Image (cartoon, helix red, strand yellow):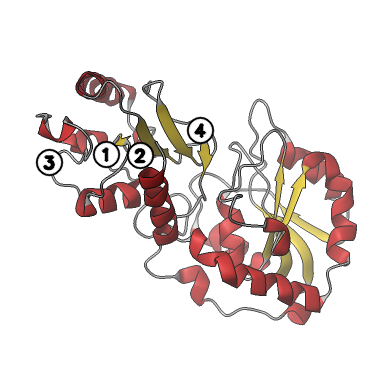
């Protein structure tokens, strides 16, 4: 991990506090998900850049890799929590009037208690939605040969799991509604958290051959496949239920370049897709080209830093 031992808190008096090396809050793990990740997660990328660039923020950044933490055994989590609890208390005491901010990709949100005045940028829960993206230094998906509209044989596809939460059955509902419809292709077997190369390639091949790709919420309110579909030149269809968790809605009009649908309107989906001809399809890709920088780690980082400098 590319983190040194010095505290990175850049606001108030906290930089003078003496902590044990905070790498304890930045654990590594052997798991690889999503399957196309080939370097840093969102949390790792942003923390690494903040630690290097040390921007002047209006918030105290909590330097913890929440998602990596969930893979740790409970006995390790207990030890880490003791350190984390001490760190947070010291920060609050040294900066009683300051606000905190943190990045958490994990669908369940931060796994340890956070100060009440913390703004959470979350992949599924929190205050501000962020895109579920990651670093791939090989640019694998972008570099694959793409098919033209006329050469794609599938109108709409879904390759993945029927993952649901205790409060959401979006994927199950979609599958039950559309599984017998010839315009929709489903493959929902053998897709696990650890995705093997064969299954990974199958997802790629089917998506490349699809004009549209179902990217419904699953366990969390968002989906990595929403952003992966764009890289495979398939327009994603984001389907949500309780909260629309797409990022940048104050800057981006999603209706111009993809499909966003509440699950209650699932019966309208087929006619919507059929009515998108090749000209409209290409127009949607033109609109995507205008905003695609937001769906990169650099774009997200710049947006995050801008927020931290302009909000109190």
How far separated are the C-alphas under marks 3 and 1?
A: 16 Å
User: Is the C-beta separation of discs 1 and 2 under 8 Å?
Assistant: yes
Q: Name the residue under label 3.
A: 6
Percent coordinates x, y for residue 210 in the rendering = 72, 68
User: Mark 3, residues whose alpha carbon is within 10 Å: few (<14), some, or many (≥20)?
Assistant: some
Q: What element carries label 1?
A: loop
Upstream in the sequence, badge 4 or badge 3?
3
**Residue drawn at the location 89% of the way across and 47% of the way down:** 267
Upstream in the sequence, badge 2 or badge 3?
3
**Residue drawn at the location 28% of the way across and 22% of the way down:** 81
User: Mark 1, residues whose alpha carbon is within 10 Å: few (<14), some, or many (≥20)?
Assistant: some
Q: Mark 2 points at which residue?
A: 68
**65 to 54, vertically: above or below:** above
Task: Please state if 249 lies on the left or on the right of 148 as rendered.
Answer: left
Q: What element carries label 2?
A: helix
How far separated are the C-alphas under marks 4 and 1?
A: 22 Å
How far separated are the C-alphas under marks 4 and 3?
A: 28 Å
Q: Name the residue under label 1.
A: 27
Q: Mark 4 points at which residue?
A: 126
Foreground: disc 2 or disc 3 = 3
């Amino acid at each position: 991990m590319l983190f040194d031992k010095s505290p990175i808190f850049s606001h108030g008096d906290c930089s003078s506090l003496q902590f044990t090396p905070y790498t304890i809050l930045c654990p590594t793990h052997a798991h690889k998900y999503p399957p196309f990740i080939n370097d840093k997660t969102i949390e790792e990328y942003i923390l690494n850049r903040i630690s290097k660039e040390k921007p002047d923020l209006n918030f105290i950044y909590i330097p913890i890799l929440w998602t990596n933490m969930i893979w740790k055994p409970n006995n390790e989590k207990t030890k880490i929590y003791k350190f984390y609890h001490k760190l947070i208390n010291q920060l609050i005491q040294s900066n009683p009037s300051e606000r905190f901010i943190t990045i958490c990709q994990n669908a369940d949100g931060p796994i340890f208690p956070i100060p009440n005045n913390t703004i959470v940028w979350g992949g599924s829960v929190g205050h501000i939605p962020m895109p579920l993206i990651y670093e791939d230094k090989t640019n694998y998906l972008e570099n694959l040969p793409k098919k033209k509209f006329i050469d794609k044989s599938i109108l709409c596809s879904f390759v993945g799991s029927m993952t649901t939460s205790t409060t959401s059955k979006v994927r199950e509902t979609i599958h039950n509604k559309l599984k017998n419809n010839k315009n929709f292709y489903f493959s929902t077997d053998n897709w696990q958290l650890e995705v093997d190369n064969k299954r990974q390639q199958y997802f790629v091949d089917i998506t490349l051959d699809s004009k549209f790709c179902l990217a419904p919420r699953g366990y969390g309110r968002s989906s990595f496949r929403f952003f992966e579909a764009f890289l495979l030149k398939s327009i994603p269809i984001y389907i949500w239920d309780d909260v629309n968790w797409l990022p940048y809605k104050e800057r981006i009009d999603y209706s111009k370049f993809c499909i966003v649908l509440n699950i209650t309107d699932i019966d309208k989906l087929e006619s919507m897709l059929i009515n998108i001809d090749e000209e409209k399809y290409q127009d949607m890709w033109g609109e995507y080209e205008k905003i695609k920088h937001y769906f990169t780690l650099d774009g997200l980082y710049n947006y995050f830093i801008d927020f931290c400098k302009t909000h109190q």
